[in-house]
Image: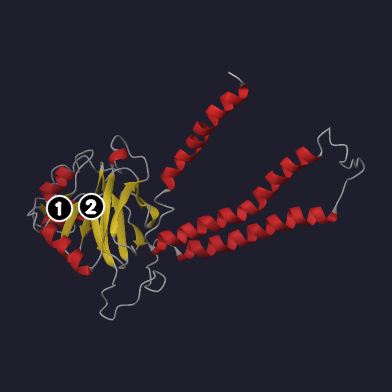
Amino acid sequence: MPAGGVLRRVSPAALLSLALPLGGCEGVLNPMGAVGEAERTLIFTAVGLMLLVVVPVIVLTLWFAWHYRASNTRARYLPDFHHSTAIEITVWAVPCLIIAILGYITFETTHSLDPYRPLTTAEAGVVPDPAAANKPLEVEVVALDWKWLFIYPEQHVATINEVAFPVNRPVDFVITSDTVMNSFFIPQLGTQIYAMAGMKTQLHLIANKPGTYFGQSANFSGDGFSDMHFNAIATATPADFDTWLDHVRASGRALDAGAIAELEKPTIAVPATYFGSVEGNPFQAYIDKFMGKGEAMRDAMHGADAAPAGETMPGMSGHSGMGN
């Protein structure tokens, strides 16, 4: 087959293969919240500024190769050329200026999008509510093998692999892990942050459009990593969120010591599960048990006098270290 025919057959396939990885950027480049939009703007701005250097270099490289080809007798031959002040200023000043602009933009954006920094209604694109309905919703998150536990401390409910919140209401995620280091990430809403055993991290996000968004683990954590994802539901109204809460409460399950012992068993592709009540303070107990407090889970779940000294909750004896 002629070389031209081979190229015609290969080129479309090659171009398609180059485009396929872009599918992984769909969530980040299609944000549905103020934080995600700010991060997308930063990405586009940074790429655009860097292209101001990259594109001219590529274009000029091709132009020089064509213009100074051996067959072009009209090209000027200057064997004694060794310096040009204009070129020196251009090739140094333009990149330095771009680096300075990138540095300033990155510094400002990094601090304004600090995941620990609570979102204000103004920067989140939300009109302040006189009734304080936009008070941040606190959700406690625990990374388990291989699932996500969400606890609503004020609403006294919990879920597995499903989290919900009203649209246009800031959400304060407080995150830890009961196993190896993991990463909590909702691509269309913004920043990812690590979940670490014995430590507490925070992430403030907001959804400005209702919908169900894909959430995932962004840090390899073992056999079930690829199935460690969840649904993040942004309800259209606070009333819809209350309806969701009523549905969770109607499950009749309680997040107690027995339920936690079951959740700590490694499982893969766990469906959404609801707990209509929460016993004690399991989130703090998950942190305390990695801080040398052997009775933390027992005390948090049952009270200080619920069991003899030294007795631990079933399923906890193998978790005295920093994960498995």
Q: Nearer the viewer, residue 272 or 257?
A: 272
What is the spatial separation of the Cα atoms under label 2 and label 1, in whole angstroms?
A: 9 Å
Q: Is residue 75 left or right of residue 119?
A: right
Q: What SS does tag 2 mark?
A: strand
Residue at 23%, 42% (x, y): give it.
319
Mark 1 Cα shell of 10 Å, populated few (<14), some (14-19), many (≥20): many
Task: Tell me residue 105's x, y (percent).
Answer: 56, 63
Labels 2 & 1 near each other (Cβ < 8 A): yes
Q: Nearer the viewer, residue 80 or 316?
A: 80
One can see residue 58 in this view? yes
- Give residue 274's mark: 1
Residue at 84%, 33% (x, y): give it.
71
Of the numbered discs 2 and 1, the one sitting upstream in the chain is: 2
Task: Give the residue at mark 2.
Answer: 162
Q: Is residue 214 left or right of residue 57?
A: left
Q: Compared with residue 158, is residue 8 higher up or lower down, i.e. above or below? A: above
Q: Compared with residue 60, is residue 233 higher up or lower down, i.e. above or below? A: below
Task: Tell me residue 47's x, y (percent).
Answer: 56, 53
Task: Tell me residue 249's x, y (percent).
Answer: 11, 59
Residue, far top: 1
Residue at 39%, 51% (x, y): give it.
27
Residue at 11%, 56% (x, y): give it.
302
Q: Looking at the picture, which amino acid does disc 2 mark? A: Glu
Q: Is residue 103 left or right of residue 187?
A: right
Q: What SS does tag 1 mark?
A: strand
Q: Compared with residue 124, is residue 89 higher up or lower down, i.e. above or below? A: above
Q: Looking at the picture, which amino acid does disc 1 mark? A: Tyr
